Amino acid sequence: MAEVGNQTQAARKPSKVPNNYPIIRVRDVWVSFGSHAVLKGLDLDVKQGEILGFVGASGGGKSVLMRTIIGLVKKQKGTIEVFGHDVDRLSEEELHAIERRWGVLFQHGALFSSLTVRQNIQFPLREYLNLSQRLMDEIAIAKLEMVGLPAFVAEKYPSQLSGGMVKRAALARSLVLDPEIVFLDEPTSGLDPISAGEFDDLIKALQQTLGLTVFMVTHDLDSLHNACDRIAALADGKVIATGPIGDMLKSDHPWLRAYFHGKRASSRLDGKKA
Amino acid sequence: MAAQAVSLNRKEEAGKLVLEAAGRWISSFAGQIERLVVDLETKRAKSAAVSIDASHIEQLDTAGAWLLERMRRDFEGKGAKAEIVGLDPRYKVLLEEVKQTNTGKDAEEQRDHNAVEDTLGYVCEMVVGFVKDSAEFVQFLGAAVVTMGRVLVRPWTFRFTSVVNQMDRAGFRSIPIIVLILFLIGGILAQQGIFHFRKFGAETFVVDMVGILVLREVGVLITSIMLAGRSGSAYTAELGSMKMREEVDALRVMGRDPMEILILPRMIALIIALPLLTFIGSMAALFGGMVTAWLYGGFTPEIFAERLRDAISWSTFWVGMIKAPFMGAVIALVACVEGLRVQGSAESLGEHTTASVVKSIFLVIVLDGFFAIFFASIDW
């Protein structure tokens, strides 16, 4: 027990990441499936405490990058550092310690369908910590209410929830260990604009409350405007630009122009002006 | 070192209880913190005012914040005035957020369980489930027959390709395993027969036994059971996952009847494939019996064939074959009903696949029993 305590303590110590050093640092990452290269020497920094929106064409490799960072997809080349550790050089135990410090919200929630929402949220607690059932119940309900779901949802099964509720419940699960980074894969896709807007606010609020760093893959222009501190754009396997939304709007890059000044984007801007 | 990571000390100050929380109140230590909090509650003195001094907390997360808040609420619940003071400002938002939670509103009422009540409830559910099951099977069979009738009236709506595809997957590809298993079973039957008939010098009757048993019962039963396990379960899983991903609904809204597109071809495929497989399987079993009889009993294949011709009649053969399409229909019916009953979860898919195999094997054997009674009474 003491050993586990020490180990997690060491892993959690924020001082290991020097000030201003990116919390995620991706350098020259290549990923290909068969002969089809998806990421071609991609570089990306994510700063501590920011909400980074990651945009790119459908099928362009946004989710692939996210899955590569969290270790679900193997890269052919390059380095990925998370919390200042090169993930390739970590032992399995160190890697597990790091995995505890991030939470992942999958595109379709990936809640375990045979468990209730409460059991889903408690799953990481049960696996990693030795807590009383009462405390686990209370933490689960607390998380559930923090993501804006009423407590009675806890006893429901995922198949009984709406799409938005599944996303919120899945977010509660990804946040239950109070991670330092959360990865969100299209968190607002499939939600109505009101729910999507609430979700953006929620992520911003949680980021402020819990001091999170958020890596958000998204297509939602409103999310990019309202929630993200910085945006990274992916095209042709590389990050072509990073910066706040203002810089993106000013950029001359043809793809960025098409993305941010396309029909859907400009109607949104016009609406805002009007 | 881990022991000092968190602490909670109490002291009295001018009639006021002061609790000093210190260290890293984070989920990694939540177990320890909770023990500290519970210890403190059991031996606490009566105080009208309690102040929880959080100024020495170095690190706080939701679990820690909740434990602070829980402590505060417990004191308030006992009628004391409690407050949390001195918390680092950067954690203020978190604490405020946590204060909004676990207020008990909207929580689902947990019912107390009573063993007798639960058992009775379970039994009743089973009975109701059985009745519902039967009703659903009959209804489904009716719907399938109606669809079949509609297809007969309008033959161009018949999905020939789909039937052939299903026959290939459920029928043709199960030939090797069915041939192998029935070959072995024929051999085992013959071997047992030879050993036991030899005791009273009736070895030659082993051919009668193998021939009649295989053609009337074993061939069709084993083939049906194999197919229920192999293809029935596949049907359930296929239809179930289609149902889960709303593909069945998609068909329906495009104005196509899932019964006609998904279920009818599967049923027809099994109704055609099962007699064919039964025939092939029975032949394999007879061959197995013949080989064993040759090796153990010294019957040459010629003698075996001769003896077999005397022992069996056309009716023996037909008794087995007539049953086969009905078995196919039952297997397909159960598999499809169970498949369409799958709800959203992966667990439900597994549950219904199991149910499909168990129920179809059960029904196949029950049906075989009824056929046995029927053929006995018409003297076949």
Image (cartoon, coloured by chain):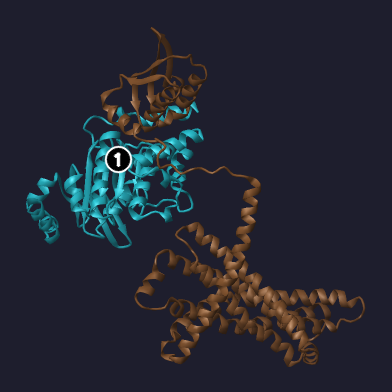
How many discs mark residues in the rendered view?
Answer: 1
Residue in the picture at 46% in, 48% down: A116
Residue in the picture at 45% in, 41% down: A122
The amino acid type, in three-letter code, at marker 1 is Glu
Residue extending farthest to the top is B14
Q: Colour of chain A?
A: cyan
Q: Position of residue B329 (x, y in %)?
A: 58, 79
Q: Which residue was labeled with disc 1?
A: A81
Q: Position of residue B111 (x, y in %)?
A: 54, 44
Q: In the displayed structure, would residue A194 be above or below residue B310?
A: above
Q: In the displayed structure, would residue B367 be above or below residue B150?
A: above
* CA neighbours of label 1 inside 10 A, class few (<14), some (14 to 19), many (20+): some
Chain assigned brown: B
Q: Position of residue B113 (x, y in %)?
A: 59, 44
Q: Position of residue B251 (x, y in %)?
A: 38, 74
Q: In the displayed structure, would residue B366 be above or below residue A89?
A: below
Residue in the picture at 41% in, 51% down: A111
